[in-house]
Image (cartoon, rainbow, N blue to C red):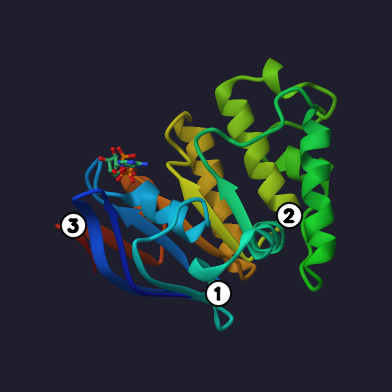
Amino acid sequence: MIDVEKLSKAFGARTLWSDVTFTIGRGEMVALVGPSGSGKSTLLNCLGLLDRPSAGAIRHEGQDLTRFGPRETRRFRRDVLGYLFQNYALIENATVADNLEVAVKPRRAARGTTGTGIAEALDRVGLAGRERERIHHLSGGEQQRVALARLMVKQPALVLADEPTGALDRANATMVVDVLREMSEAGCAVVIATHDDGVRDRCDTVFAVRESSLVGVC
Ligand SMILES: Nc1ncnc2c1ncn2[C@@H]1O[C@H](COP(=O)(O)OP(=O)(O)OP(=O)(O)O)[C@@H](O)[C@H]1O
């Protein structure tokens, strides 16, 4: 699904990680672990075309994502990627339903994938019947769950999640990981940056960002 080859990232004179090589398969759930500041979010940002690596390649279906121009980047984000990031990336002034509708279009564009219906996705994340509420009236944890429902509707091939359980109580954290697990079992590749051992233990593969490199833990 994704082949990362000799990827390096430096900010000025500081190298975060270098010569990082790994593969993420379809249906695989991967945890990225490591100390605060080691560069987990930066690696996710590179995979999600939100930041550029300093060297190396990220290949998807034979194409090197690091060479994408603006149009290919937009298309890849629309058709392949799903983000579950700390700022949720929801449209603040729109309703819950509007935010989920936005995800239905790309799903239709990416033929062959079947996402969950809006009502069903909201029910799954404990927000049944909240379609007409505006995002800015929801709590942080509720917004996080709308972002998760949006992923279920979109059913992207690759999900990138940055500390997806950080702002949640244990019951909701378990629900989030259950949903990500279900998505991976449906064929989606899921990459999660996390400090949460409960999340790490539910992943198929664990990579640790350690002393400027990425080490397979199990
Ligand atoms: N645009 C930038 N310019 C300079 N330094 C940056 C930039 N973005 C991130 N960094 C630095 O890179 C380092 C790694 O940041 P990153 O957020 O990737 O770490 P992390 O492992 O995800 O940390 P945490 O677990 O605390 O979220 C940090 O020291 C950060 O300050």
Q: Secondary structure at mark 2?
A: helix
Position of residue 175 relative to residue 8, above or below, is above
Q: Residue at x 78, y 57 (%)?
A: 106
The N terminus: image quadrant: bottom right
The C terminus: image quadrant: bottom left
**Location of residue 30 (image quadrant):** bottom left
Label 2 Cα neighbours within 10 Å, binned few <14 / some 14-19 / many ≥20: many
Provide residue 60's location: percent of width, then percent of height.
55, 76
Q: Are marks 1 and 2 in contact (CB under 8 Å)?
A: no
Q: Earlier in the sequence, mark 3 or mark 2?
A: 2
Residue designated by label 2? 154
Provide residue 163's location: percent of width, then percent of height.
42, 41
Q: CA distance from mark 1 to mark 2?
A: 16 Å
Q: Residue at x 47, y 60 (%)?
A: 47
Q: Secondary structure at mark 1?
A: loop
Q: Secondary structure at mark 3?
A: strand
Does the residue tagged 1 have its C-beta within 8 Å of any atom of ligand 1? Answer: no
Q: Regarding ligand 1, which quadrant of the image does it lie in?
A: top left
Q: Residue 68: which disc?
A: none
User: Is any atom of residue 102 visible in this view?
Assistant: yes
Residue designated by label 1? 26
Between 47 and 86, which is closer to the camera in this rendering? 47
Q: Residue at x 67, y 20 (%)?
A: 138
Q: What's under tag 2, amino acid-wise?
A: Lys
User: Is any atom of residue 216 visible in this view?
Assistant: no
Label 3 Cα neighbours within 10 Å, binned few <14 / some 14-19 / many ≥20: some
Q: What's under tag 3, amino acid-wise?
A: Arg
**Location of residue 84 (image quadrant):** top right
Q: CA distance from mark 3 to mark 1?
A: 25 Å
Residue designated by label 3? 210
Provide residue 14's location: percent of width, then percent of height.
19, 49
Position of residue 128 relative to residue 152, above or below, is above
